[in-house]
Amino acid sequence: MTPTGGDTGSRNSRLLMRLLLWADRTGGWKVFDSSTGFRLPDGSVLSPDASLVSLERWQALNPEQRSGFPPFCPDLVVELASPSDEGPRGVSALRRKMAGYQTNGAQLGWLLLLQEQAVEVWTGRQSDGPLPEPQRLEGVSELYGGMVLPGLVLDLEEIWRG
């Protein structure tokens, strides 16, 4: 992956800071940045722009698993589409990546579409049913963690501004 531009890097830093503040206040969660690769159940290695993993799942790993690519899919994955996401790295590629997270067990995924100021919310499978289609949200100023991440509220206006 090529590096992001300054605006996207700044937005991603703010996103990580907000997730980390929530995780520290709430307890029970580990926050990871875009440098962290996860080895998903299907064998692929992906690195979301930001992610959360329950502390219980993290502590169940041995030191070798922690130092390498953690062998699971994060509970929350966040991808921030940037103006540089064109061609094979375009939004359609990010949607395929989000579908991969969803298929591999992510409970919640947020694809932040900066230029449209919209969000696609990807949720996990409910029991043995099919994977739900992502829900597109437009004109919203906050995202909520719902039952997966109770109390998490992400101020999107802050992210859009950069």
Image: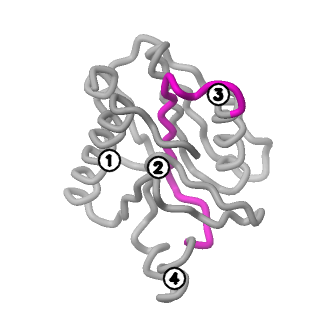
Density class for disc 4 (Cα within 10 Å; few <14, some 14-19, many ≥20) is: some
Q: How is the image coloured?
A: one colour
Dots 3 and 2: beta carbons under 8 Å?
no
Q: CA distance from mark 1 to mark 2?
A: 18 Å
Q: CA distance from mark 1 to mark 4?
A: 23 Å
Mark 3 vs mark 4, foreground winner is 3
Q: Amino acid at mark 1?
A: Leu
Q: Amino acid at mark 4?
A: Leu
**Which of the labelled discs sits on residue 61, or is there none?**
4
Where disc 4 sits, the SS reads loop
The residue where tag 1 is placed is 16
The percent position of residue 40, horizontal first and vertical second, equals 67, 63
Position of the C terminus, as image quadrant, is top left
**Which region shows up in magenta?**
70-88
Mark 4 vs mark 2, foreground winner is 4
> Count the marks: how many?
4
Pick whichever, 121 or 51, lies toward us. Answer: 51
Of label 1 and label 3, which has the lower sequence position?
A: 1
At horizontal 54% and vertical 77% (from top left) the residue drawn is 68
Can you say whether 119 is above or below 130 in the image?
A: above
The residue where tag 2 is placed is 148
Of label 3 and label 4, which has the lower sequence position?
A: 4
